[in-house]
Amino acid sequence: MLKYILKRIVLMLPTFFGATFLVFLILSKVPGGPFEKAVMQLKMGKMMGGSEGGGNGGNGMGSKELTPEQLDQIKKQYGLDKPLLTRYLIWLGFYPRDIKEKTIAYGEPFRENIAYVEIDKRKYEKQRWIKVEKDASGALKVYKSGIGGDFQFTDSKGQTIEELPPSSQITDWYPSKDWTVDKTEADKAVLVQRKFSGIFTGDFGKSYKYDKPVLTLIGERLHISLYFGIIGFILAYLVCIPLGIAKAVRHGQGFDVGSSALIFLGYAIPDFALGVLLLTLFGGGSFLDIFPLGGFRSLDWDTLSFAGKIKDQLHHTILPVICWMIGSFATLTMLMKNSLMENLNLDYVRTAYAKGLSSRTVVYKHALRNSLIPIATGVGHVIGVFLAGSYLLEKVFNIDGIGLLGYRAIVETDYPIFLGFLVINIIVLMLGNLISDMLYVAIDPRIQFD
């Protein structure tokens, strides 16, 4: 079993790389991305500036064209200054990312801020000098200063603990591994700092809109989506499996026909449309005012008692969970019913009846276990649907989970969030499929993966 699991994990890698690269390629070709939006905003800003200043010959319109330098700067800001494959490898963390850039003249040092340290309950900036010089062979080398134990400390007011002498008096220089020469000109060079930083190093990038790390944004909302997803997942199986069994043993009777009509009616209604309907009927619209219009909790949550918090949480849970369940309700119920009916017609069930066993014993002890095998095949997909959040449901109920975060990322072309959301979805679905395989073995001992 362990060998099979390791093999499946290895096979997940090409699936992951193929899916993420395809989406990465599509996003790079789709018009209206963050680069185009930034260019449009700058153009509009220049036009408005020209209008206010009465420039461009007094016609009230400024020049909306951007210089090549401005376009290059915007491309660099969004990481579009490199080829597609290089950008993809940077995003994965397999290729170093530019994190700092500085242009300096040869032999002219500049002061680099490293970090903040606390000395005598005061914060000071940790600084040192960097310069570029040519060695005897004419090659460019980057050096760092060695004054004051390699560093100088300066507080926010510019006061120093150890006064740094003029750059001409600095004699202790050491080769710098942090900075490298990226481009050269006649009298100056462009220095860059690079490091491996991507999803495989735990860095999913930073949101264009929120200016926060993607993992931080997802982590702040993940528990909300997990709350509704797990409850919906558990309730769906707790209701659908017994209902499917009851329909199978009462096949063709009034209960079977009536329940089939209801579950297929629910299946025909999209979950987000059902959400709008439920909010209209029970959310204080033109009808009943029983449930809130949305949200995860009430605004006065912190002031509620323990019992009040439980009541408030349940109050905000019922309608969204109903919609979370409705999409898989008919599928799971009918799958359970048909699987059990198929097993009830097999020879081993007839043999059990011939031995005089009761119907309850035959159904629950012999036929049910084999009937659960098809249910296990869909667990992986269902886990992905429930745990990854729902774009439209969270939008309808105004639930600030990762589904709503992903929806806003698509609308606002916030690609780092969208790609981070994609990675989580792919991982959850692949692990869910592996769980389905493991459930095969747990349910049916005849199945072996060794």
Image (spheres, helix red, strand yellow):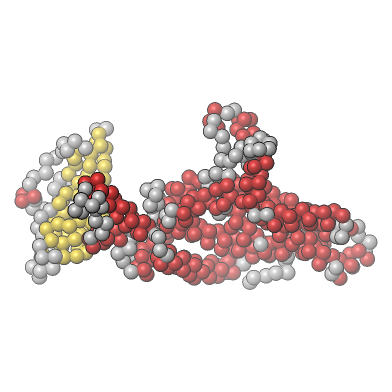
Please identify the quadrant where the C terminus is shown. Answer: bottom right
The furthest residue to the front:
59
Q: Is residue 225 left or right of residue 42?
A: right
Residue 301: image x %, image y %?
55, 32
The structure residue drawn at horizontal position 49% and vertical position 53%, both measured from the top left corner, is: 406
Q: Residue 113, percent across and down? A: 22, 47
Q: Quadrant of residue 279?
A: top right
Give the residue furthest to the left.
168
Vertical placement of residue 77 versus 114, above or below: below
- Residue at figure coordinates x 7%, y 47% from the top left: 166
How many marks are shown on the rendered structure? 0
Return the x and y of residue 28 as percentages of the image width and height: 40, 65
Is residue 199 shown left or right of residue 439?
Answer: left
Q: Quadrant of the N terminus?
A: bottom right
Q: Is residue 235 above or below residue 97?
A: above
Q: Is residue 98 visible?
A: no
Q: Nearer the viewer, residue 183 or 348?
A: 183
User: Residue 206's x, y, as percent?
Assistant: 38, 52
Identify the residue at horizontal 17%, vertical 57% (top origin): 103
Above or below for 137 versus 310? below
Q: Residue at x 27, y 57 (%)?
A: 64
